[in-house]
Amino acid sequence: MAASRIHGNGTWNSQKGDRYQGQWHTSQKHGLGAYDLHDGQGYRGHYVDGEREGFGIFKWSGGVSYKGFWVAGRPAAVAAGTLVQEPKDEALKAGNTLLKNSLAKVDPNSPDQDGIWQTRRYLIEVWKATGMDMSKVKFLWSSEEISSRAEEYWGQALDIACRTTLARVKKCCQIMGRDEGSLTAAQILYPLMQCTDIFFLKADICQLGVDQRKVNMLARDYCDAAGRKLKPIVLSHHMLYGLKKGQAKMSKSDPDSAIFMEDKAEDVERKIQNAYCPSVPEDISVSEGMALVEDDLKNPCLDYIQYTLFSRAGYTFKVAGIEYQSFEELKQAFTQGTVSAEELKQALAAEVNALLEPVRKHFEEDEEAKQLLEKVTEWRRETLTPTSSLVRLKLDVGKARVVFAPLPSEYPRLSDALEVLRRLQGDGKKILWLQDWSARAMGCVGGSVDCVKSFYELLLHGLRSLDPELMSQVTVQWQGEAILSGPNEYWTSVINAGRQYSLEAVREALPEGEELDGAGQVVATIMHLGDVLALGGSEVVLCSGARHRNLHELAAKHAEVCGLQMPTVEILDMPSLRLQAEGDGKEADVQVLITDKEMDVNRKMKKAFCQPGNAEFCPPIDWVEAMLPAFGEFMVKRKPENGGDQAYGDAELIRKDFASEALHPGDLKTSLGKALNAAMAEIRLGLKKPELKKAQNKLNQYIKSLQKKK
């Protein structure tokens, strides 16, 4: 029926046995149609320009089906979607359940580690008591999975952080019951970890409560940012109202806001009798984004009836001698006054108690379950506070001078190497800390693992070439390697640090003038606190430039709060060695790079700002001052009629001669270019090594990718 495939109704059959019957437009499926595949799968619903679009039902060959809305050929993340299993006697298939005890640590109201461990065992007992076939369920302990695959998990988390704005993460904080003004750094980390779980588990479908919808949607947003074509399908489930007026869901701090699985019969009756139960709409507000369907009554009693009772096939609700076959029928009777609130509550309490009786029996007769319940109940009664015990990665370097290397960029600057060498000079053990994982969180060089590594390899090569004697005394510590030596301890210390500091504290720890707008900035800040805690010990000196003063001071303060000796923060700044004024020229043209060839240095020196007589701002003189330790002395070569050769051992003498115009800009720049090229000879020789050529190529490829985006 070729003609009908152009426009109108028609049928198409493939050689494999696939068949489409329905509407067409311009030779594409468009409108209502049915597509049956030869392997037993099939779709019934709407099409737009050949793609499933709008409402439809897809059935897989194994009996699982998706009923809901579709966008661009994929199930949409909307409330109308439901995943159903057929036949009903095979409803429980083998699957994975992740119990997130690591994420519980983020919440200051969570019990300590032992309490979290016991609570997750308690949850399994609850599911067992409800009749779940435990042979068909696989439980994954979050902390164990993360520890065994720490590099994979945290690498994914860092990538999500670097691609996500702080404003976007704040939208997710509804899941923790916090408004934006009271958020801690850990509560920003929580949604990022929740999002990471989805990709860590390779989940195709995320079925969670509607309160976590924004976290699940964050995963889809991340796919867009990361260029991942396959996005997780989001199925958001209804959250039962809290039993009190205006509660969009239960409150952990209010035991009477919900029915618990182990509640005694009298507790259930009391809670339901006291529950909010209007028969006409009242003016109340609930949290934004909590409702999947419009509900003018917001009656928790009706809510329990609809979603815990009528959700069972063939269920009928008996109240005041009348049996109701559907929820809609019961709701109408209640709102019209046929059923009173008292009658409704009595019947509901009886039904809920009947549901819970097998659970109560299990916790009474099973000794292990009974003990778990007693512990969990005891924790609920206590006023829980954040743990005061110190958990940290223990590198314990003793007396040490620790220099944090600059964050990577696509241009490894020679000035970076000079600053690091100057800061490493001092007594005690010398440690150079390479912030490779923090750099990924911050999105440095696109958050690329290869580019971050390439930058630091080139920086290390520059350092070792310029001052091999000093660098032979330096311990180079890659942050990632340190973290992986004890990932559980490290990230626990980071999470605990995040619990103690607000977003405002993070903002104050940023460099002067830097705005807090990325989730990665929050993560990198609390990672720095974990880094400094790991150094531990006494007599640690944190040496940096003014840019990192605030961050080091917060880390030093945090170490003292945790009971360690406060590290000393030493600020050692150097003048900018940029060859032009700030804002002038492209970065690659106004910085001397570790990878620069002789011709590059000569070209840059020729164009360097060097106004006659202006010694206040003269980048070439700043370069001479920075390089004098390497030069020994700086020799200006010139003809006898121009004053002859002049050796300088003091930068101030150069400034004096330049200010008086006894030293000409042309002579200064030419001599500096020659001196720099001589000093960089060893660097250039090493850059011919295959591994450093590869590092240069990685950064060059990244630069090209940036240029393509312009």
Image: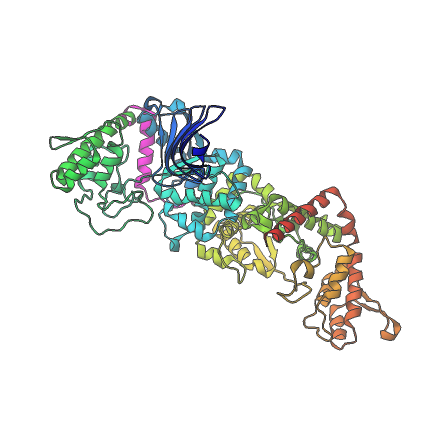
Q: Which residues are magenta?
A: 363-387
Residue closest to the far bottom: 660
Residue closest to the far front: 3
Picture residue at 33% right of the left edge, 35% below the top? 376
Q: Is residue 182 above or below residue 642?
A: above
Q: Is residue 524 above or below residue 364?
A: below
Q: Is residue 6 left or right of residue 472?
A: left
Q: Is residue 311 left or right of residue 107?
A: left
Classify the position of the C terminus by image quarter: bottom right
Judge by depth and name the residue closer to the eye, 206 or 563: 206
Q: Position of residue 569 (x, y in %)?
A: 57, 57
Picture residue at 16% right of the left edge, 44% below the top? 279
Judge by depth and name the residue closer to the eye, 26 or 559: 26
Q: Kindly indicate the quadrant of the structure image that contains residue 34.
A: top left
Q: Is residue 669 left or right of residue 396?
A: right
Applied colour scheme: rainbow
